Amino acid sequence: MFWGDGSEAAKAAAQAAIDAVRSTDHFNWTFIALLALVVCGVWIPRIRDKRWNAVFAALALYGVHWFYEIMNAVICHFSGYALWHVSPESTSWIILVGVCWELSLMFSIAGFTAELLPEDKNKKIFGVNNRIVFAIGSALGFSLFEIFLASTPAFIWVYRWWGFLPVFVTTYIPFFLASYLIYDAKRPTQKKFCGVLWAVDVLLMLVLIPLGII
């Protein structure tokens, strides 16, 4: 499934996702187990070992991800449907219309793929800086997997013009570019970028959630 099909079934599934935002009807204990595994198994070891470049790379990707999710929810509020929705039956908790608890935890650690980057940040692959090549490659991998997700009841694309190609170009490439470029940045730049990005995300949620927009 490369594109949304605009079908009545897709619209009904999307509406079910909209109705289930922040509902605890499907809550289960995997919520706690997954959180513990991500925090204790992934984040704490890197913080303990002071692998700050990787930590900031992960924070950058996760912050960009949340900005996109907020914008996706805003689009849903004003146009009727989001660009992507998650099904309530597939998750223990929908946080915003396009992101569930499990998906959010995955994105919280996706930026650690920066640790696979070549040590030489200036090395070129086919004449292109390796950071850009790796960002495009990671984005392509995530986009291909999203095609599979969109073919299941768990993930819903409604708009016929939204699908693999716009996801790849406008969503995942910026995610990984932010992460991989911040990985190499000087510490003040890392702190400033992530600090401003997360401040914007938090401010938007503090304003838009009470207003019922997201």
Image (cartoon, rainbow, N blue to C red):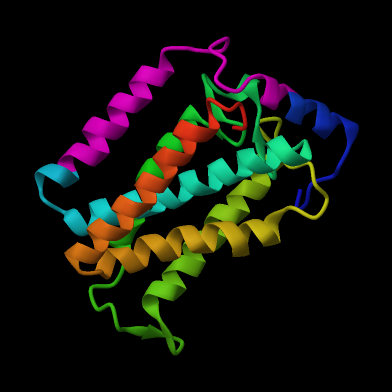
Residue 33 position in % (x across, y down): 34, 20
Residue lying farthest to the left in this orientation: 49
- Up-down relation of residue 207 to residue 111 (above or below): above
Which contiguous range is marked in magenta?
16-45
- Up-down relation of residue 77 to residue 198 (above or below): above
Principal secondary structure, stretch drawn in magenta: helix
Q: Is residue 110 at least partly visible in the picture?
A: no
Q: Is residue 127 at least partly visible in the picture?
A: yes
Q: Is residue 97 left or right of residue 63?
A: right
Would you say residue 28 sits in the magenta stretch? yes
- Up-down relation of residue 175 to residue 98 (above or below): below
Residue 197 position in % (x across, y down): 38, 52
- Up-down relation of residue 136 to residue 207 (above or below): below
Number of marks: 0
Would you say residue 208 sits in the magenta stretch? no
Residue 136 position in % (x across, y down): 51, 68
- Asked which quadrant contains residue 203, the reply is top left
Q: Is residue 190 left or right of residue 129?
A: left
Instruction: Tell me which residue sits at (20%, 69%) in the image.
Output: 186
Residue 90 position in % (x across, y down): 60, 24
